[in-house]
Image: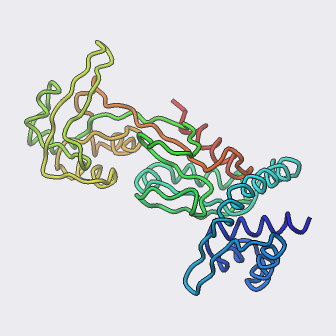
Amino acid sequence: MDHLNDMALFVEVARVRSFRRAAEALGIPNSTLSRRISELEKAIGLRLLHRTTRKIELTEAGQLYYARSKHIVDEARLVHEQLGEMLEQPGGILRVSLPVDFATLYLAPILVDFAGHYPGITFEFDLTPRRVDMVTEPFDVAIRMGKLEESGLIARLIGRHSRQLYASPGYIEASGKPATPEDLAAHECICMTRVSTWNLHQRINKVDAEVGVRGRFTLNSVGMIRTLAIKNQGIALLPEKIVADDLAAGRLMRVLPEWKGPDVSIYAVTETRLTPAKTQRFIEFLSSKLMET
């Protein structure tokens, strides 16, 4: 049984590649953790970790042991949660990677609502444009938008956002309102980086249009695109839920309202299907909100 406990300790060290960070997460002294891992290596008869003053690396035996033991530890943890009160009121630290603009412009009220339902959970949100490594970094779940790359991760579709064309009343007054998608070629269009065409769909007649677009501003931030559109800098293709308040306040108006862009898919990505109760509840809660029409 001691070896099973030490296996769980090893999995945490291997996951974060740090005795200090693992000890903090486990709530035990660093010295105790190091001693327990050394005893595990002696019991197995193989070195599992290369230790230096700057980093920790897995040996070949450590990589094999981690790959096998992680699933055992995850499943054991899940069984204990499902048999206990944590399934009803999960607790612990929930570590989530979130897209910056989506989180700040839209998700914040939903996250606050979730926190109110589950007072036993504390949160570490990492708002970053990079794709975090779910295998080597200590995240429970990553929320990702758009097309996903092929990987061994588990991705669950939790929502879709419709996109429409918007501009400020000031821009329309100065530059005129386009009547057809082809008219967009004569307008300032605020585009995402590496996007030179907008694929639009007319829902009534079920007609598609691929339009070349250009403008002075090309960037990789939905939040900044929204701000520039409000500041009379051009026409933007944006998720309608993100600009709902701007539309209601008159800061933005729909352009070519019968046309829309492709929906943006929203995914919850985890390393494994064996997720703890806190992660399950979080994904289910987001899905219930994001799938609402």
Residue ID at (20%, 36%): 197
Nearer to the camera, 10 or 156: 10
Q: Most extreme residue toward the right, as rendered?
A: 1
User: Which of the 4 image quadrants contains residue 57?
Assistant: bottom right
Left or right: residue 226 versus residue 29 is left
Nearer to the camera, 36 or 22: 36
Task: Name the quarter where the N terminus is drawn.
Answer: bottom right
Image location of residue 138, percent across then percent down: 60, 63
Number of numbered tags placed on the structure image: 0
Image location of residue 126, percent across then percent down: 51, 63
Q: Most extreme residue toward the top, as rendered?
A: 205
Left or right: residue 273 versus residue 106 is right
Image location of residue 262, percent across then percent down: 35, 31
Image location of residue 184, percent across then percent down: 14, 33
Specify the color scheme. rainbow
Residue ID at (11%, 39%): 187
Residue ID at (13%, 46%): 215
Nearer to the camera, 82 or 16: 16
Q: In this view, does 250 lie above or below 209?
A: below
Left or right: residue 41 versus residue 2 is left
User: Which of the 4 image quadrants contains residue 189?
Assistant: top left
Left or right: residue 110 versus residue 232 is right
Q: Is residue 214 above or below residue 227?
A: above
